[in-house]
Image: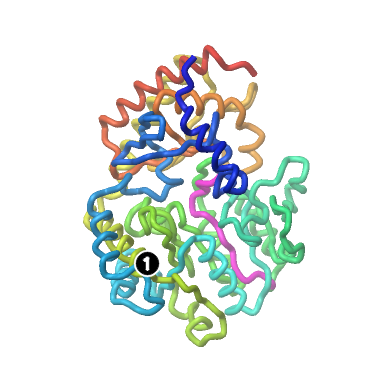
Amino acid sequence: MTDRFSQSRRLFERAQQSIAGGVNSGIRKMEQPVPLYFARGAGSRLWDVDGNEYIDFQTGQGALLFGHAPAGLADAIAAQARLGTHWAAQSELEIDVAERVQSMVPGAERVRFNNSATEVVMSALRLARGLTGKRLVLKFEGHYHGWSDEGLVGFAPPPDQWGSDDEPTRLHPSKGVISEVLDQFVVARWNDPEHLRRRVEQYRGQIAAIIFEPALCNTGCMEPADGLLATIRELCDREGALMIADETITGFRFGASCAQGYYGASPDLTIFGKAIGGGVPFAALAGKARVFEPIIRGEVVHAGTLNANPLCLAASRWCLDQILALGPQHPAGLQRLGAKLIAGLEALARQHSIPLQPQGPGLVFHTAMLKPGAAHGPIRDYRDYVRRHDAPRWTHLRRCLLENGVRAIERGLWFMSLAHTDADIDEALSRSAAAFAQHAAGWKP
């Protein structure tokens, strides 16, 4: 049988002789049957080095809201590259981008730029502690806030190390983390306002911030329960803590006012990444002017050689202008296409008796593969996700989809982009029909 991924295999073998582990981000080794190497992308499509074409719903882990290689973005980057890529100084571009964020996001009274959302998270937590004089940060199980020592506390603990329902573990998945870092966090379960109240009460007067993904996209695509975001706001106000929305994934995908506008939340600080740069390394911290006072006074250090470099700013200005041009109908188009894809996948699952359960707001969604005997219905938190999601079976279906030219994220997440069309969805479902049949015939528990 012909190996359709032979060139990727060859390159991966070669890479392991020079790149540690053969990849530059550990998560990329999850791809089966081999980490793929790509030659080019255009709009909703990707082509790997073996010439295989994919309808892409991975979209650069959600960064490519505008699709692959949009001509306007390429032109903006090229024009700036001819003027200069880095000055370690100021440019009018940074004001242009900051003013656009101000005009789009309620509460974005001041902005600071970095090169990755992981950096912005670190800045936000440092700022929260510097402003409040408190040391603890409350975060939620399953929420991902970058790969730093702080960002991954409590992210994905194995079931035998969960801790109790009332006292979730502060486990970090990496070795080499300074153990004292874990003691600076309180972990709560997502989508349980009363549990959250108890956790905050347990550490009353000690919490500097509550940080969260407005919709838990990194684990199962779980939207917030009714009243949850309002409870976070109430508790932060009561405790004098900062409400920090990590909109790395949701920012500008959920509309010009982002997920906080979509869900009616009002955070003190917001973390932006991915779509704000359209695929270049760019991120931002935005929030209330009073919150930035420690940075303005120099009491809290925020720095970076490549911060606000003009190449990334030119890309971001183009991206934000596209969102502004869409007007108030955005993200309705993404939601409609996502709903169409979800309905088609559900129909294929029923046809082949595959226990696939999509969930999410459509513009981004997750496909859970239910374990034998697992209940149907919305998955609400990380523990429920682990108990019900059959990861090995999803991995098999995901590989079948890949072999038929449909690319979703390894952990089951699908992103709609502004480059996707109805024709793309129709073709993706046609290709998925073959993949579902292949999975149904070949899956062995």
- Which residue, given by chain and number where applicable, does mark 1 sit on? 106
Q: Is residue 98 visible?
A: yes
Q: Residue at x 55, y 39 (%)?
A: 14
- Residue 422 magenta-highlighted: no
Q: Which residues are magenta?
A: 206-219
> How far across and how far down the image is residue 244, in percent?
52, 64
- Residue 213 magenta-highlighted: yes
SS for callout 1: loop
> How far across and how far down the image is residue 27, in percent?
57, 44
Image-quadrant location for residue 151: bottom right
**Looking at the rendering, in which quadrant would you find the C terminus?**
top right
Q: Residue at x 35, y 59 (%)?
A: 257
Front residue (pair 136, 70):
70
Which residue is situated farthest in the top direction here?
441
| Image-based side of 359 in relation to 308, left or right | right
> How far across and how far down the image is residue 65, in percent?
35, 48
